[in-house]
Amino acid sequence: MKAAAFAYVRATSVDDALGLLAAHGDRAKVLSGGQSLMPAMNLRLISPELVVDIGDLGELRGIAVTGDRIRIGALTRHVDLQRSSEIAKHAPLLAEAIAHVAHPAIRNRGTIGGSLAHADPASELPACMLALDATLVVRGKGGERRIPAIDFFRGVFQTALTAKELLVAVELPVAKSSNVHFFREFARRHGDYAIAGLASQAVIAGGVFSDLRLAFFAVGDRPVLAVVANKLVNRIVTPASISEASAALDKELDPQDDQQASGAMRRHLARVLLARCVATLLGRSELAGATA
Amino acid sequence: MTAPMPISLEVNGERVDAHVLPRLNLADFLREHLHLTGTHVGCEHGVCGACTVRVNGEIVRACLMLAVQAHGGSVQTIEGLSDSGEVADLQTAFRDRNALQCGYCTPGMLMAAQDLLKQQAEPSRDDIREHLSGNYCRCTGYQAIIDAVETTARQRRSRAR
């Protein structure tokens, strides 16, 4: 289908965009790369009266490393992340995950800010933000808010952003040499939205996790930072402890049935991902088959 | 503001000036305003890849871009790549290997395949598969398409020597 009629304005500055959003509220939609907004508009899932195109705002583009933080402008495209030596060095989880975000033609236009603000629970980048303990930087007419990723995602296509605010950047802690990561998703076709996926970052000392962040996606209405990771930290991991964590993981997930998979299948895949992640990170292949 | 807006862009090397509604996507602009019907419209939500074109040198989904967003940019369609001879060898390889039947996906396949071959001279079959993963073909089962792209890469390497 085609998008319904709308008015279109090309914002000339962040302040200009914020002024338009303040005036039009939830009747307006922000257009960055358009790779989530345009499908939704073409399918008539949403029909904004006004589209505010922020594509010209160069100040929202780019990757900068300052001390132990890396700041990524909201308009930075997936392909820019994929080609960035700084992302490869300082956020290797993100570098690995980005290859799973859609296809080349979409990565050439889609932006990190657009993907996060859209908040599809089956998409990769929100889960990466949880695994990496990111902070989302949001601007409104009144000033800037800094929102931890864990508080940003509120439900299917729901975030902490109000209709009058703009996501301007994300900030991540630079990966330390002690960090290890894991990314895996199940999808019908490479690049499609996941049926179930897991983004993880951890610290291992002496064969034991001293920190483990497990961010599951496509298994609930938002990405899930699994509390069960605690059951695997500061102790020798055994098949029994993975089984225990897998069983407890079930209670944290709320996967939906859809045409791709049943909720039960998604729960099963999440348990498989948990075991494979732990086995891969610890380099102990005998743990990979341990599920509840 | 829902009225037509003026846009100015380059399409296949020629300057184009037009007035378009904001809701008009780039694929429909190319097809209906410029009669460049080689850009096909399949799913209209970014899944099938039939509408793949180049904007400022990079492949994009023409159905997921507004014509007004192309203002000031440079667009190349399959007509441009075909007329210039840029993909002549790829087209020959597709024909020789029967890498198309109905042909609906072919313009998009050629755009995506040429994009890969420009970036990588020696892609593996997995690389080809991955780069074309966003393009659906419902006729061929893909094997012949992968063969044709692989053959073209090999021919270009031997010509370059």
Image (cartoon, rainbow, N blue to C red):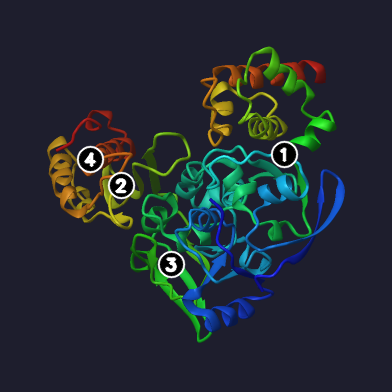
Q: Amino acid at mark 2?
A: Ala
Say if residue A111 shows up in the picture.
Answer: yes
- Pair 2/3: label in front: 3
Q: Amino acid at mark 1?
A: Thr
- Pair 2/1: label in front: 1
Q: Circle 1 — which element?
A: loop
Say if residue B161 shows up in the picture.
Answer: no
- Pair 2/4: label in front: 4
- Please give the residue where the numbered disc 4 appears in the rendered image: A271
- Please give the residue where the numbered disc 1 appears in the rendered image: B37
- Please give the residue where the numbered disc 2 appears in the rendered image: A205
Q: Are marks 3 and 1 in contact (CB under 8 Å)?
A: no
Work out whether mark 3 precedes mark 4 in sequence or the reverse, and give the earlier one. Answer: 3
* A187 in relation to A94, above or below: above
> What is the crowding at mark 2: few (fewer than 14 residues within 10 Å), some, or many (at least 20)?
few
- Please give the residue where the numbered disc 3 appears in the rendered image: A135
